[in-house]
Amino acid sequence: MTNVINLINVINVTNVINVINMINMINVINMIDMINMTNMINVINVINVTN
């Protein structure tokens, strides 16, 4: 019984870690997208100013 409980706990922990990792990945990707967007906008603005 304790073995089953331990197994379930291990599975739950890995699931939580996986979910956290997924969320972190998504957040990192979103951050990179945001940074890329702002960089593009800044470049476009600079080009517009020089024009």
Image: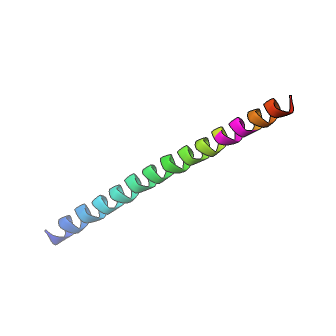
Among the 4 quarters of the image, the one containing residue 36: top right
Question: In the displayed image of the protein, which residue is found farthest to the bottom?
Answer: 2
**Which of the pair 14/20 is nearer the observer?**
20
Dominant secondary structure of the residues highlighted in magenta in the image = helix
Give the extent of the magenta segment: 38-42
Q: Is residue 8 left or right of residue 40?
A: left
Q: Residue at x 56, y 48 (%)?
A: 31
**Which of the pair 27/39 is nearer the observer?**
39
**Magenta region includes residue 13:** no
Quadrant (top left, top right, bottom left, bottom right) of the C terminus: top right
> Residue 18, how many percent across, how many down?
40, 55
Q: Residue at x 54, y 44 (%)?
A: 30
Q: Is residue 26 left or right of residue 50?
A: left
Residue 40 against residue 26 in the figure, above or below = above
Q: Residue at x 28, y 59 (%)?
A: 12
**Magenta region includes residue 41:** yes
> Residue 11, how many percent across, how many down?
30, 59
> Residue 8, how many percent across, how many down?
23, 61
